[in-house]
Image (cartoon, rainbow, N blue to C red):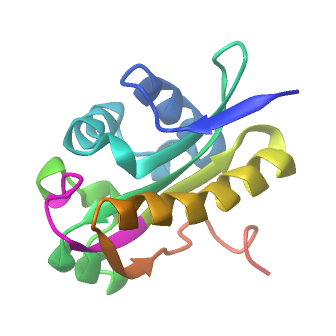
Amino acid sequence: MSFKVDFPKEEDCKKIYELNLEAFGSELTIDHAYIKEWYESNAYQWLIAKDEEDNLLGYINISHIKNKTFDDIINGRISEKDVRSEDILKLGQKDKICCYIQGFAVRNKNTRVAISLLNKVLAYVRFLKEKGICVERVGAINRQGTDTCP
C-alpha cells in the first residue's frame, strides 16, 4: 500500500472528524464545525496520510495556539474541545509559537503510517523554520486513558 503525507485540503476536515470518532469516540471528538474553523484559521497545522484512492489513513494535528490557550490546556483549565478559531494562530502571525498536539490517529493501528507521520514532523519543523517561525513550546496531554500509555 502506498500513501502520501501532506497538508490537508478543506474537504479533508470531514475525514479528520470521522477518523477522530473512530479512534477516540464521541466524548473526546471535537465537533466537525470546529475542525473546519481551525482549518480556515491555519490549514498548516495538520499532516495527513492518504492512499491513492484519497482515503485518510492517519493524521497528526499540531495546532499553533496562543500562549494563554497553551497554558490553559496544559494546566487543565480548559480541554482541547474548548479551543476555538480565535485561539489558533495563522501561519506567520507570530514568529515564536506554542504548538499543541491536538490529535494523532491512524486507521487500523497502521504502524507504517504512524512512523511516517512522526518522521514528517521533523520536516514540518524545518518548514516552519524556513517561514521564520520558531517553536518555543510543544505540548500534549493523553486524555484517552492508560490503554495508550504503559
Depicted 47 relative to depicted 95: above or below: above
Q: Is residue 101 left or right of residue 117?
A: left
Image position, residue 86 (x, y; %) = 11, 54
Residue at left 64%, top 49%?
Answer: 105
Q: Which residue is nearer to you in this view: 137 or 108? A: 137
Residue at left 50%, top 34%?
Answer: 16
Image position, residue 51 (x, y; %) = 72, 24
**Is residue 133 found inside the magenta-colored segment of the image?**
no
Range of the magenta residues?
87-100
* Residue 106 sits in quarter: top right
Residue at left 35%, top 38%?
Answer: 31
Q: Is residue 82 left or right of residue 48?
A: left
Depicted 135 relative to depicted 40: above or below: below
Q: Residue pushed farthest front?
A: 130
Placement of the C terminus among the 4 image quadrants: bottom right
Q: Residue pushed farthest top?
A: 53
Q: Is residue 38 left or right of residue 140?
A: left
Q: Which residue is nearer to you in this view: 133 or 38? A: 133
Q: Is residue 112 left or right of residue 85?
A: right
**Is residue 92 found inside the magenta-colored segment of the image?**
yes
Image position, residue 12 (x, y; %) = 46, 25
* Residue 59 sits in quarter: top right
